[in-house]
Amino acid sequence: MKATDLFPRTPAGRAAILAILASGGIGFGIARLTMETHTPPAASGGNGKSVLYWYDPMVPNQHFDQPGKSPFMDMQLVPKYAGEGAASPGAATPAVSIDGSQSQALGMRLATAERGTLSSTVTATGTIDFNGRDVALIQPRSGGFVQRVYARAPGDVIPAGAPIADLLVPDWVGAQFEYLAVRRTGDAALVAAARQRLLLLGMPAGQIESVSRTGKVRNVVTITSPIGGAIKMLGVRAGMTVTPGQTLAEVDGLSTVWLNAAVPEAVAGRLRIGARVEATLAAFPDERFSGRVAAVLPQADTASRTLTVRIELPNREGRLRPGMFATVTLGDGVRSALLVPSEALIRTGARTIVMLAEAGGRFHPAEVRTGSEANGRTEILAGLNEGEKVVASGQFLVDSEASLSGIAARPIASTTQTAPGTQVYETTGRIETLDRGSVTLSHQPVPALSWPAMTMTFRLTDPAIAHGFKPGDRVRFAFDQPSEGPTLRRMTRENGQ
């Protein structure tokens, strides 16, 4: 068969074949155009690196094929370059690599973790209140009738011994006549018994002596206040009948007062019972009143997250009145602490981290435990060594890049404080034995010390370093050599464990 035999000889057949070829050509062209439109060419940045995708640093898990403005935030998308965020060859810890030009564009600023003085003084506000331990309940020891009341009212400030009411006690009359008759007999035993009966009936000892001295019966007693202070409650009226133990009045003492201060729970744990306190009052702005912490109340205010600190203040002149507003200064001055700028901290709610800066533009996260904060600086209790550098501005962008690259934060237990200038050596090994005070490791050579591979024991000053480890674990560790001997400073599991 000839090739020409495959082609139709009739005009209609030729037209059909041409239509099929034309439709196929058009279809191929459309398919080719569509593929080229949806497969963008590999982009490259100004630094010569190829761009993998663009992303919003605030939403790093969302990737975009083209640059432009973020749909989430009012900012431009950031390119993700090939090989960016990978660990440097031979590096012990994976890190984010950022060159100098990018650091300047991000506005990054570094700060050094350094020792400084941190004020442990806490300023709080509070109000003056009555001393709840200095309260007098005025009650008669005998039943009777109120013969007279004195001009008193709730809120009156009275001195100690101030009269409250005169009480007529009928039961005393017969007992007093009996007592006077026995005294005339001269029988000491009978006299003592009669006197004891008067005491049991509630007659004051002073009034018994007055009856003995004058020979006259007295059946009216004046009820007085045993302390000076403010009348809180007055429940006695002329002509009323009272029973033994009935409360006629309640008096709050004013010789000392309580100052109840609301202290943030974050610092209340540093307060100690008996600690010295100074207070200033709006009523006496030029004076300072000294007192001591009497108690830290056990319940916190759930709305303000504060604890109430009870401070006892002397009030000899009675000038401190309940309800007055006061400003309190608590604490014992300043102390030394490892400090970083507060703005360098990234608080996630579950933990606090900082971005460590290393040589060569490398950054990686580290978890820290924080303490007090004052004047824009925060105390680091664990997780950083003195002299380490942290990112104080622009750290959120670096943190999002580290999260995107899957770089884990250095745990708190992997570092301890070392003295400035101390030489720290690092190598790998295997844990042989482990106890609270030491760790025995079979380690690789340490070229800086000309040590060959060997098994040796390292001191463990902080048991938290070895928390969670067990014999057989392969670890990377750092140590120094103080006069006491090789001492372990940090330890982490090797990759793959």
Image: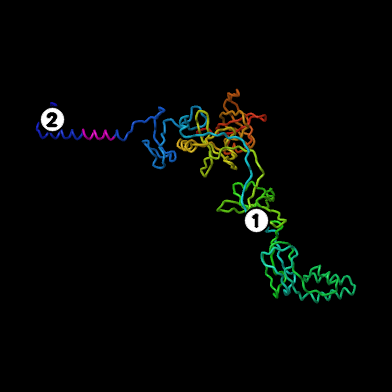
Cα gap from disc 1 to disc 2, whole angstroms: 112 Å
**Type of secondary structure dominating the magenta stretch:** helix
Name the amino acid type tagged 2.
Answer: Phe
Instruction: Point out residue 268 in the picture as x, y percentages from the top left corner.
Output: 62, 48
Callout in the foreground (1, 2): 1
Q: Secondary structure at mark 1?
A: strand
Which residue is under mark 1? 128
Residue 203 against residue 463 in the figure, above or below: below
- Is the N terminus in the top left, top right, bottom left or bottom right quadrant? top left
> Going by the image, does 203 lie left or right of 337?
right
Extreme residue toward the top, this view:
450
Disc 1 to disc 2: CB gap under 8 Å: no
Q: Is residue 32 part of the magenta span, yes or no? A: yes
Label 2 sits on a secondary structure element that is loop
Mark 2 packing: few (<14 Cα in 10 Å), some, or many (20+)?
few
Label disc, if present, on residue 7 of the rendered structure? 2
| Count of labels in the image | 2
Q: Nearer the viewer, residue 247 or 445?
A: 247
Q: In the rendering, at what x and y percent does residue 349 appear? A: 52, 45
Q: Residue furthest front?
A: 286
Residue situated in front as seen by the camera: 443 or 172: 172
Q: Position of residue 241 (x, y in %)?
A: 70, 75
**Highlighted range, magenta:** 25-34
**Which of the 4 quarters of the picture holds residue 337?**
top right
User: In the rendered structure, which disc, 1 or 2, sits on the residue that comes first in sequence?
Assistant: 2
